[in-house]
Image (cartoon, helix red, strand yellow):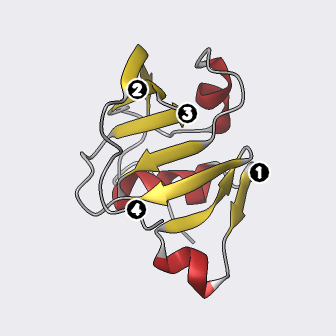
Amino acid sequence: MSYTTLPENLDIIGETECLRPLTGSYFTSTGLGKIDRIFLSRDTFIDLRKFGRDWLDLETLAENLDKGIYGKFLGADLIILKNAEKDKVYCVKESKCFLINIKENPRYTASNLRFK
């Protein structure tokens, strides 16, 4: 199965807000138990790749990358959608979904970060 959009008929059982940067601790408090899939935008994936690397296992198999699966995050398939809303993360287990809305953090801006 190739993922291009969110699955239909998701039952959103909860929603929370978090401040940037997005890390693994937000995913463990969803109430879903072990999450099967995480759907997110490319921009949000950049946060996880930088600040969630302790929990991230990047995918290298071309067949999985073609399906949109870019790795595993806390054991869940990490799926990047081209048309996903920026700053929304959908944590899915079967047909149940927990939504994480990411808010800007004034301490986490391009001008405050120094990359070396």
Mark 1 secondary-structure assignment: loop
Nearer to us of marks 1 and 2 is 2
Residue at mark 3: 94
Q: Amino acid at mark 2?
A: Leu
State the residue at coordinates (54%, 65%): 69
Mark 2 secondary-structure assignment: strand
Q: Amino acid at mark 4?
A: Tyr
Q: Are marks 4 and 2 in contact (CB under 8 Å)?
A: no
Q: Are marks 1 and 3 in contact (CB under 8 Å)?
A: no
* Residue 41 or residue 93, whichever sits in front: 93
Q: Are marks 1 and 2 in contact (CB under 8 Å)?
A: no
Q: CA distance from mark 3 to mark 2?
A: 14 Å
Residue at mark 1: 54
Q: Are marks 3 and 4 in contact (CB under 8 Å)?
A: no
Q: Where does the image place residue 92, in percent across and percent down from the top left?
A: 51, 35
Q: Quick one: label 3 or label 4, which is nearer the N terminus?
A: 4
Q: Which mark is residue 99?
A: 2
Q: CA distance from mark 3 to mark 4?
A: 15 Å
Q: CA distance from mark 4 to mark 2?
A: 18 Å
Q: Which mark is residue 3?
A: 4
Q: Amino acid at mark 1?
A: Asp
